[in-house]
Image (cartoon, rainbow, N blue to C red):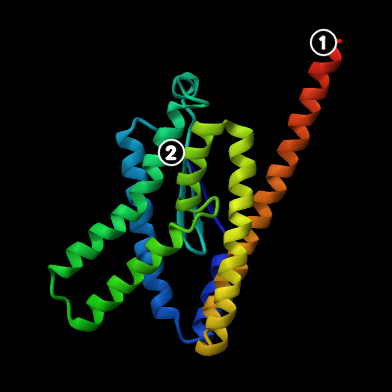
Amino acid sequence: MRFRIDLKIFLFLILFYFTKQIETYVLIIIFAIIHEIGHLIAGLCLGMKPDKMEIRPYGVSISFKIIPKDYNKKILKGNILEIKKILVAIAGPITNIIVILICNNIDMGLFLNLMIIYANILLILFNLIPIYPLDGGRILKGILYILFGKRKSEQYINFISFIVLIIITFISSIAILYLKNIAIFIIVIFLWGIYIREDLLIKRKNKIYDLIQKTIEIDAN
């Protein structure tokens, strides 16, 4: 399995250190790793093989190898692989919910308990935002893939991600104005970075799709 560290994590550590929120950030990273372990366990239970592990500013990301037999088994306009991806994506937030339930039954001091619950709630809410490739975006894209096929699912999730980001940016602007919390600004910028990267990737894919389609039409004629 390949391993990679996103160097932006050090930038986040510096920013949160100077904004005096380093403890919260470190706690979120710890439970983000536990969150990702939930993805890993779900993937292994579904017979998927880990391909790459990457440490990112918001935690650890694990990708899995595509098994041809899963890709070839059709479900509507998608395949069995999409069902597995949806289940793996759901497993992360469920893991954080389990941590919260365990925390409620273990007395580690009121402050620590509240911090753990707070960190896990943030992770659940953040990851369920319908922006690809966050868990919420993965779940929605998988459903759209099954219903409408690969190309349309990419176009739809890209458009939905853009609309959601506009709404988040508007709400965050108000929150920053009143709370004076730079962490919110950093998160919004980070989300826009994710969207722009995926948008460029989809545009490249669309050019390839169009080129292939034109080639097929020329051969047919």
**Viewer-proximal residue among 82 and 217:** 217
Q: Which of marks 1 and 2 is nearer the N terminus?
A: 2
Viewer can see residue 57? yes
Q: In which quarter of the image is the C terminus?
A: top right
Residue pictured at 30% horizontal, 77% vertical: 115
Task: From this view, report whether residue 54 is shown above or below residue 78.
Answer: below
Residues marked 1 and 2 touching at CB (< 8 Å)? no
- Choose top left, top right, bottom left or bottom right for residue 30: bottom left
Front: mark 1 or 2: 1
| Depth order, front residue of 37/210 | 210
* Residue at image point 22% right, 76% down: 113
Secondary element type, mark 2: helix
Q: Is residue 200 left or right of residue 75?
A: right
**Distance between the alpha carbons at the discs numbered 1 and 2:** 36 Å
Q: Which residue position holds label 2?
A: 85
x and y percentages locating residue 22 in the rendered image: 44, 80
Q: Is mark 1 on a helix, strand or loop?
A: helix
Locate residue 208: give its quadrant: top right
Tag 1 residue: 220
Q: In this view, does 100 lie above or below 2?
A: below
Residue at the (45%, 51%) spot, across then down: 135
User: Looking at numbered disc 1 in the image, what kind of residue is underneath it?
Assistant: Ala
What residue type is disc 2 on? Lys
Question: Residue 170 appears at what percent x and percent y?
Answer: 60, 73
How many discs mark residues in the rendered view?
A: 2
